[in-house]
């Protein structure tokens, strides 16, 4: 099947059939077609009895097989005979052939079939159901079954004039249904929403962290201020959280009740100690809620300190009072930035 | 006997009876191989190729009659490049 027989195989078959040796058979085949070529060159036509006729034309070499050979080859299809068709049948046959060929080439067969078919099926059916199934099942037997199912629905006289007048509008009217499906399938980019939610979460967390640290710093200040006169000491022990929790309520009430006393108390200095891992920035963050307020601590203790980067551990520093909620004071922030720039320029920080 | 067969027999060195029997055998080979959808290649000349023809509509230009032609199996010949060149045939 679909293989090619070469000259040695032909010669062997000829030798066994005609009773000659294969060399002679090979020579005969070669000389036979050489003679055919010579005749074609001479008279543009050559005939081999039992095989066929070769004709050299302007379109090329034409081979017409011998009648007996052609009929023998076509024997499996000999039972078929040509049939005369009407013009309508011939046109329909050609259309079906074209559609089958197009469907074999393109996967989008329904579009082609919809163009080829006249609006025979579309007007007879309801607009919503006619467009989709009709083109798909044209070449299938199920289509012929679907047509009679639609015909009993025609008695609706109100629909027929609309369909016959403008069948194209009916096909257009059926379009919104798939459009609605496509709109529903559109996805609102869930990953974008998730990214926005993530960014918002980070921003909210950052703001809450800043606010809570400022609030805790503000809450600890009255404790520090009140604890010093109670202990009459300059040590930094009163910063402990336990002591703060014990006197927070009493201190805030006392400060509110007697502002003059509170003002005097706030003027009392508070001290802290620089450690190996406790720098001015750490102390400033603990006392003010902002580590960039270290400049105020340094400014207060500048007479005893050399460079902000050269403070030895164990050095006690005075913590100046910066007012209520210093972390929320924009003036202090601006002044802190100014001082930081000044110190950075002075000490090459 | 045909002149081509006589010429081939003379060139191959065989008598007329052998040439006729070999020509008949060659036709039988073509018939048998074409039925099996096999091609027969003649070196320097061309290839005999069986082809299936689908059913189709033919229209008579004179009468306008449409005929549905049945499918079939035909034997085509593809000339070789050397033959095409020697005969100055178009592609």
Image (cartoon, coloured by chain):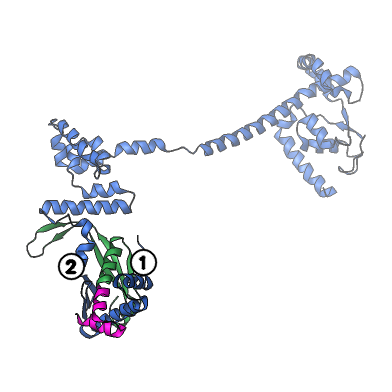
Chain colours: A blue, B green
Q: Where B91 sits versus A4, above or below?
A: below
Q: Which residue is mark 2?
A: A67
Label 1 chain ID: A
Going from the N terminus, do you reach mark 1 or mark 2 first? 1
Circle 1 residues within 10 Å: few <14, some 14–19, many ≥20: some
Residue B4 falls inside the magenta stretch:
yes
Residue B36 falls inside the magenta stretch:
no
* Whole-number angstrom distance, CA of label 1 to CA of label 2: 23 Å
Viewer-closest of A188 and A82? A82
Q: Which residue is mark 1?
A: A4
Residue A218 percent location from the top left of the image? 75, 25
| Numbered tag placed on residue A216 in the rendering | none
Circle 2 residues within 10 Å: few <14, some 14–19, many ≥20: few
Give the residue displayed 87% in from the left and 21% down from the top: A228
Quarter of image, res B36: bottom left
Q: Secondary structure at mark 1?
A: strand
């Amino acid at each position: 099947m679909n293989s090619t027989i070469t000259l040695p195989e032909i010669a062997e078959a000829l030798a066994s059939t005609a009773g000659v040796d294969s060399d002679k058979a090979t020579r005969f085949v070669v000389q036979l077609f050489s003679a055919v070529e010579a005749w074609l060159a001479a008279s543009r036509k050559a005939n081999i009895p039992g095989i066929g006729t070769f004709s050299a034309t302007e379109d090329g070499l034409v081979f017409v097989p011998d009648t007996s050979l052609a009929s023998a080859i076509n024997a499996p299809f000999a039972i078929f005979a040509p049939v005369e068709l009407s013009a309508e049948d011939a046109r329909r046959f050609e259309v079906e052939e074209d559609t089958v060929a197009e469907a074999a080439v393109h996967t989008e067969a329904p579009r082609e079939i919809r163009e080829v078919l006249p609006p025979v099926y579309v007007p007879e059916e309801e607009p919503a159901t006619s467009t989709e199934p009709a083109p798909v099942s044209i070449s299938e037997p199920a289509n012929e079954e679907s047509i009679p199912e639609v015909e009993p629905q025609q008695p609706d006289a109100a629909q027929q004039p609309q369909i016959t007048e403008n069948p194209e509008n009916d096909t257009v009217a059926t379009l919104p249904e798939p459009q609605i499906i496509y709109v529903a399938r559109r996805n609102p980019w869930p990953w974008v929403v998730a990214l926005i939610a993530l960014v918002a979460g980070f921003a909210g967390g950052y703001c809450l962290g800043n606010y809570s640290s400022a609030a805790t710093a503000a809450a600890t200040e009255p404790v520090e201020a009140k604890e010093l006169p109670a202990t009459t000491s300059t040590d930094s022990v009163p910063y402990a959280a336990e002591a703060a929790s014990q006197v927070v309520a009493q201190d805030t009430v006392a400060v509110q009740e007697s502002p003059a006393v509170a003002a005097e108390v706030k003027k009392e200095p508070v001290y802290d100690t620089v450690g190996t891992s406790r720098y001015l920035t750490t102390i400033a963050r603990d006392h003010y809620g902002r580590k960039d307020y270290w400049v105020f601590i340094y400014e207060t203790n500048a007479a005893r300190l050399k460079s902000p980067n050269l403070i030895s551990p164990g050095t006690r520093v005075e913590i100046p009072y910066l007012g209520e909620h210093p972390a929320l004071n924009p003036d202090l922030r601006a002044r802190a930035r100014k001082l930081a720039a000044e110190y950075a320029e002075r000490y090459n920080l | 006997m045909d002149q081509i067969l006589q010429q081939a027999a003379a060139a191959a060195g065989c008598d007329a009876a052998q040439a006729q029997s070999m020509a008949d055998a060659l036709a039988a080979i073509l018939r048998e191989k074409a039925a099996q959808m096999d091609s027969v290649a003649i070196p320097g000349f061309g290839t005999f190729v069986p082809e299936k023809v689908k059913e189709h509509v033919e229209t008579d230009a004179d009468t306008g009659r449409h005929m549905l032609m049945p499918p079939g199996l035909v034997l085509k010949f593809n000339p070789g490049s050397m033959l095409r060149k020697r005969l100055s045939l178009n592609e």
